[in-house]
Amino acid sequence: MGKIEVKVTVEPIAHSQVASWSPDSHHGAMNSFIGIVRSTNLGRTVVAMEYDCFIPLCEKTLFDIAAEAKEKWSEDANIFIVHRHGKLEVGEASVAITATTRHRDESYRITRYIIEELKTRAPIWKKEYYQDGETDWVRGHALCQHRKVDHHEHGGSPSCGGKIHSHETR
C-alpha cells in the first residue's frame, strides 16, 4: 500500500538524504522536488528566510496532502516530505518532496500536487531578511482560509506575482 513519511525539522536537508529515499523493488520511478531559498524576491535582495510553524499541525497537514495525492494517483506510492523550520541562508533547501511509484507520470503528478497544495494549505509562515537590514513577512497562508488552486487552469505556481486563480472550498 505504500507509505508516507513527513518531517518538519531545524536540521539541514542534505541532497544525499533525498537520494537515499529509494523506491520499492516494484516501483520504476522516483521523482524529487527540492525547494531552495533564493536570493531575490519581488526585486529585493534576500539574504535569509525564516520559516515558522506549529510543527504538529504542519506535519498533520503535510500528511493529509500526501494522502490525498496517493488517493488521486497511486495507492502504492511512497511519499517523503521534509520541510525546514527556523532561519535558512540563501541556497539552503527549505523543502524536499520525493514520490516513488510504478510509473513516472504518477510520481511527477504527486510531487507537483504536493508542492502546490503545501504552498496554499500548510500553516507555514515565511519571514524574509533583506540585504538592507529590513525584514518582512511574506504574504501567504491564512490558517482559517483554505484555497483550492486549479493547477490545470493556472499552469503555474500560486506565487505568480499575486495573480492567484482559485476557488473557495469552505
Image (tube, rainbow, N blue to C red):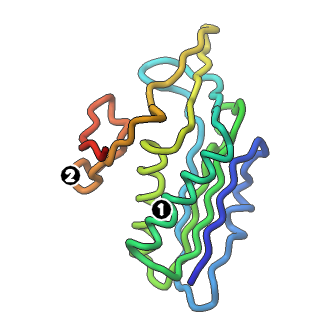
Amino acid at dot 2 = Glu
Mark-to-mark CA distance, 2 and 1:
18 Å
- In the figure, is residue 6 to the left or right of 101? right
Farthest residue toward the bottom?
Answer: 26
Q: Residue at x 40, y 75 (%)?
A: 73
Q: Residue at x 44, y 25 (%)?
A: 139
What is the secondary structure assignment of the residue under circle 1? helix
As drawn, 59 above or below 54: below
Place of residue 34 in the rendered image (x, y in percent of width and height, measured from the top left):
58, 52
Q: Are marks 2 and 1 in contact (CB under 8 Å)?
A: no
Place of residue 9 in the rendered image (x, y in percent of width and height, measured from the top left):
74, 46
Q: Quadrant of residue 10?
A: top right
Q: Quadrant of residue 108?
A: bottom left
Place of residue 44 in the rendered image (x, y in percent of width and height, measured from the top left):
49, 17
Q: Quadrant of residue 86?
A: top right
Q: Residue at x 48, y 48 (%)?
A: 118
What is the secondary structure assignment of the residue under circle 2? helix
As drawn, 37 above or below 69: above
Q: In this figure, what is the number of numbered marks?
A: 2
Quadrant housing the N terminus: bottom right
Q: Residues within 10 Å of mark 2 (few under 14, many from 20)?
A: few
* Residue receiving disc 2: 153
Amino acid at dot 1 = Thr
Quadrant housing the C terminus: top left
- In the figure, is residue 156 to the left or right of 50? left
Farthest residue toward the front?
Answer: 170
Frontmost residue, 47 versus 169 = 169
* Residue receiving disc 1: 111
